[in-house]
Image (cartoon, helix red, strand yellow):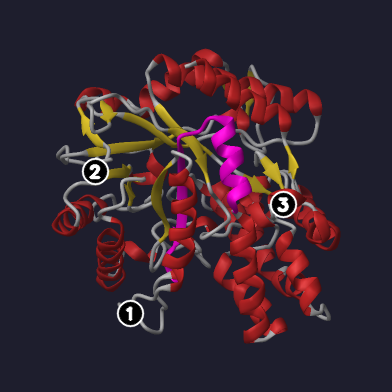
Amino acid sequence: MTLLRVSGSRLVDEAGEPVRLRGVGLGGWLNMENFITGYPADESSMRAAVREVLGEERYEMFFDRFLTSFFTEADADLLRDVGVNCVRIPVNYRHFEADDRPMEIGERGFRHLDRVIGMLGERGVYSVIDLHALPGAQNQHWHSDNRTHVASFWEHRHFQDRAVHLWEALADHYKDNPWVAGYNPINEPADPSGRVVGPFYDRLVKALRAVDPAHVLFLDGNTYSTDFSVFHEVYENTVFVCHDYALAGFAHGGPYPGFTRGEWCDRDELERAFARRTAFQRETGTPIWVGEFGPVYTGDPSVDEQRYQILRDQLEIFDGCDAGWSIWTYKDVGLQGLVCAGGSYMERFGPFIAKKKRLGADRWGSTMEETASELAPLHRLIDTEFASWDPYPWGARYQTDDLIRHILIAQALLPEYAELFRGLDDDELLALADSFALSTCTRREPLIRLLADNLTAR
């Protein structure tokens, strides 16, 4: 078996046969996210708070067990049976390099990543390695493990040097692995100036090709994988990756079809949005691959049926273009996952997760209406005194919510979350981690059936 490669507008195997990568993102595993596993704020702040409560040894025991339980042979079997042929694996750089020992690559991250890539490959499922959190944070939000709202990666050459060095190590490690479909070096870059990201991609591609000239590169556009004007050339053997979240599918989404915050969304609009987001790929004749998409589910059957219809419509649109895709996300605590954690973790942390929801402390789960009366005076002040303020990436209302609700309030919740670990013995800690094992999870059957039907139809 040889590596996949780009041939015109398609990926092909060693025989030249087209391979359309369709699968899931393994969010919340080697890159944890607040809405996926139930903690507040960002991963590194959460880990620091939990380490303070548990102590170093028991902290390491818990998180190592979590990483082992979160994805096992049973999960790989389920995905194979659903019919996926690809898993996009988000990774936090901190599994391979510590901030206090920059440029020193450790082996722990490889141990976990090798295990999952190997299990998937044994079942005929490819992996795309996605660096989701880069040193200094490549975007403004929690999913790059950003404690602030500043993407410092684009401001400091030091962070960029470390990212190149890490990718050289990753590429050297996986250069001969045929079940690695390729490398997704920067998830959702968000360079406010738009002037650094393009030259950095030039540098990174050159460095990667020097180590591994054969694997496919999956490159996200700027501004959260929506802006491809930063690319001034089409690199060889490269897929340019778009993300395609539907407005009506967000937590704050309205009816479908219908209006969400004054904007109409129906199937025709989904198709127009997808055409805009993939214009660069069509113009350059390169493969179309949607690295992330997928609605948020509410627990209300009537609303969720509309969310499933959004997904059906998107998949039909992708099918019409022979576009590959990776739905977000495989496993979580109830917002989007194909399967959702249960067991003692949800019993112990369920009320805390409900409090986070009441406060709207997670951007991805927020309707932007929680604590609206408390924030309304601040929004009025901003609108009145700074009417022309339009901060990158999405304007004043989003920026204000990010700073107050999703950073300040979220960080204030960290001690409360960490205290829920206090007083537990080792067996109880391991049971918490095992709550994310598939045997303890519940399955979102309508979503699983919808995806399986699509995957087996073509």
Which region is colored magenta? 72-94
Q: Residues within 10 Å of mark 1 (few under 14, many from 20)?
A: some
Instruction: Check the image and report above or below for 108 versus 5.
Output: below
Helix, strand or loop under label 2:
loop
Residue 95 versus residue 40: which sits nearer the camera? 95
Q: Quadrant of the N terminus?
A: top left
Q: Residue at x 64, y 59 (%)?
A: 69
Using the image, tell me which numbered label, if any, was put on residue 230. 2
Q: Nearer the viewer, mark 2 or mark 1?
A: 1
Q: Of marks 2 and 3, which one's residue comes earlier in the chain?
A: 2
Q: Quadrant of residue 236?
A: top left
Q: Residues within 10 Å of mark 3 (few under 14, many from 20)?
A: many
Q: Of marks 1 and 3, which one's residue comes earlier in the chain?
A: 1
Q: Taking the image as drawn, is residue 228 in sight? A: no
Q: Of marks 2 and 1, which one's residue comes earlier in the chain?
A: 1
Q: Which residue is mark 3?
A: 360
Q: Which residue is mark 1?
A: 104
Q: Position of residue 94 (x, y in %)?
A: 45, 70
State the CA–CA distance, disc 2 to disc 1: 31 Å
Q: Position of residue 226 (x, y in %)?
A: 38, 37
